[in-house]
Amino acid sequence: QVQLVESGGGLVQAGDSLRLSCAASGRTLSIYGTGWFRRSPGKEREFVAGVNWSDGSTRYADSVKGRFTISTTSTKNTVYLQMNSLKPEDTAVYYCAAHSGVYAAVQLSTRQYNYWGQGTQVTVSP
């Protein structure tokens, strides 16, 4: 089993930055990809950013490209999401997710992720 714990959320103003952290524990060697998702009120959970550990490739949603960056420590046990130039539409609960499946590319669908954190709230005021 893998446990994921997010931290770093909060209330900020538009244009500010935040860095979210996702700490993984347990059978972390079984993780082959990590992603960040978010859910805004009344919306489905959506892909934000992800990394495929097999080749280190990353991918971002168009809405955050150029503003958000996913990164990790050398041990890959902590994954970060650096969020710059935040907008009110970025307000959501952000979830860290990981999968033990081996894929050739970053996975965009929640269905491929079998481990989830509890989420951290990010609120961006105008």
Image (cartoon, grey):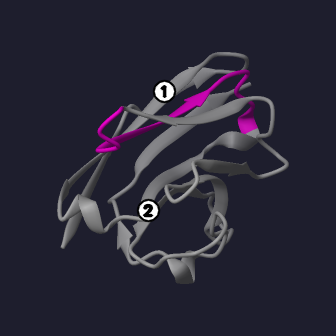
The amino acid type found where label 2 is placed reads Ala
What residue lies at 63% left-to-right and 31% top-to-bottom?
124
For the residue pair 119 and 41, the one nearer the viewer reads as 119
Where residue 79 sits, quadrant-wise, is top left
User: Residue 5: x and y, percent?
Assistant: 27, 50
Where residue 100 sits, quadrant-wise, is bottom left
For the residue pair 97 and 14, the one nearer the viewer reads as 97
Q: Is residue 104 above or below residue 120?
A: below
What residue lies at 66% left-to-right and 48% top-to-bottom?
58
Q: Which residue is mark 1?
A: 19
What residue lies at 35% left-to-right and 33% top-to-bottom?
74
Q: Is residue 117 above or below residue 17?
A: below
Q: Quadrant of the C terminus?
A: top right
For the residue pair 73 and 61, the one nearer the viewer reads as 73
User: Residue 18: x and y, percent?
Assistant: 53, 24
The amino acid type found where label 1 is placed reads Arg
- Count of labels in the image: 2
Query: Bounds of the magenta span?
Result: 74-88
Whether 56 is among the magenta residues is: no
Q: Which residue is mark 2?
A: 97
